[in-house]
Image (tube, rainbow, N blue to C red):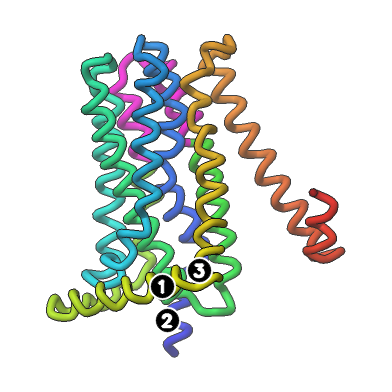
């Protein structure tokens, strides 16, 4: 009975939309805002600082996990994080785009992405604890697809809105509305039980001890390195919007390239996923490598 209840309350498809909301700042800040700020006269290095602040917030995700797991409910944490995402992005889009506003925009980018990181931690916890084992693979696939689609749609869509609408306020409203609609999928998640405040110190302490114990092992160090390397090496992709003008790439072309890149990535993932089931994961890895 419990398994049936969880299946009803946590459909795998919901994770697609939940991740769309949490990944929305990546596309908006990295592509749409990066391109628009440079076009408005903000220096590339200042724009890069704003994008770096956004990326830094996601690297601190590990610090939020013990708190999210030890207090309130994951659904409440998701709502709080998603709210920070939407408010921060709205202010970023309508704030003055000039050198004097760079500190403000840097803080807003960090706050918005911190909200996304908190919401992402909550979603991963929901997936780990509230989804039946037999459906974890499906939920994980939907989650990954949501992130890929969101980064392209948020960047390309918001850039197109900023380029073709008469003002930035309507563009901000339209962009944020999509993130809000996607985040509404949290209603499909069971409310859960909120831990007692008296349990909070012990639960956070236990989580931190477990994390430290893992990092003190060879396997833990290897996991940490494998997590950090692709994140760090891929961060420069966030500057594509900021340096697009140096390659004489128009906003419409940049938006189109972003969508095509996402489509190619999804098609490649589907194809090589199918190939790995036909000839084996290791053989597929050798072919790609």
- State the CA–CA distance, disc 2 to disc 1: 6 Å
Disc 3 secondary structure class:
helix
In front of the other: 119 or 171: 119
| Residue that numbered label 3 is attached to | 220
Residue placed at 51% from the left, 79% from the top?
132
Q: Is residue 174 magenta?
A: yes
Q: For residue 209, what is the image quadrant?
A: bottom left
**Percent x, y of residue 225:** 53, 56
Which mark is in front, 3 or 2?
3
Q: Quadrant of the N terminus?
A: bottom left
Residue that appears at 71% across and 45% down: 267
Query: Which callout, 1 or 3, points to the residue nearer the camera?
Result: 3
Magenta-drawn segment:
154-178
Checking the image for residue 215, the label placed there is none
Along the line of sight, which residue is nearer the eye, 102 or 144? 102
| 12 in relation to 54, above or below | below
Lateral position of residue 121 relative to residue 253, left or right = left
The residue carrying pointer 2 sits among few (fewer than 14), some (14 to 19) or many (20 or more) residues within 10 Å by Cα, namely few
Query: In the structure shown, which secondary structural element does the residue marked by tag 2 occupy?
Result: helix
**At which x and y percent is residue 67?**
26, 66
Q: Where, by quadrant of the figure, is residue 211 drawn?
A: bottom left
Which residue does the numbered mark 1 point to in the structure image? Answer: 9
The residue labelled by disc 2 is 5
Q: In the rendering, at what x and y percent does residue 100 appear?
A: 21, 16
Q: Which numbered disc flags the more N-terminal residue, 3 or 2? A: 2
Q: Is residue 162 above or below residue 266?
A: above
Residue 20 within the magenta-colored segment of the rendering: no
């Amino acid at each position: 009975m419990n398994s049936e209840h969880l299946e009803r309350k946590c459909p795998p498809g919901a994770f697609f939309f939940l991740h769309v909301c949490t990944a929305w700042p990546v596309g908006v800040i990295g592509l749409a805002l990066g391109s628009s700020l440079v076009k408005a006269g903000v220096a590339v290095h200042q724009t890069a600082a704003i994008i770096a602040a956004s990326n830094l917030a996601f690297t601190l995700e590990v610090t939020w996990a013990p708190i999210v797991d030890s207090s309130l409910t994951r659904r409440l944490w998701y709502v709080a994080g998603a709210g920070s995402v939407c408010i921060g992005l709205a202010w970023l889009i309508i704030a003055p785009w000039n050198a004097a506003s760079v500190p403000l925009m840097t803080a807003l980018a960090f706050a918005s992405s911190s909200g996304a990181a908190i919401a992402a931690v909550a979603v991963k916890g929901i997936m780990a604890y509230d989804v039946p084992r037999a459906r974890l693979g499906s939920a994980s696939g939907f989650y990954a697809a949501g992130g890929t689609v969101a980064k392209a749609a948020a960047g390309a869509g918001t850039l197109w809105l900023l380029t073709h609408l008469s003002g930035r306020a309507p563009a901000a409203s339209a962009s944020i509305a999509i993130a809000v609609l996607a985040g509404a999928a949290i209603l499909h998640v069971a409310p859960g039980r909120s831990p007692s405040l008296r349990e909070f110190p012990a639960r956070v302490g236990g989580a931190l001890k477990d994390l430290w114990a893992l990092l003190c092992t060879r396997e833990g160090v290897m996991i940490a390195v494998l997590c950090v390397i692709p994140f760090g090496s891929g961060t420069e992709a966030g500057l594509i919007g900021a340096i697009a003008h140096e390659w004489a790439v128009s906003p419409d072309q940049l938006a189109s390239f972003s969508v095509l890149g996402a489509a190619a990535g999804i098609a490649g993932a589907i194809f090589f996923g199918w190939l790995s089931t036909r000839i084996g994961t290791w053989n597929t890895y050798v072919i790609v490598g």
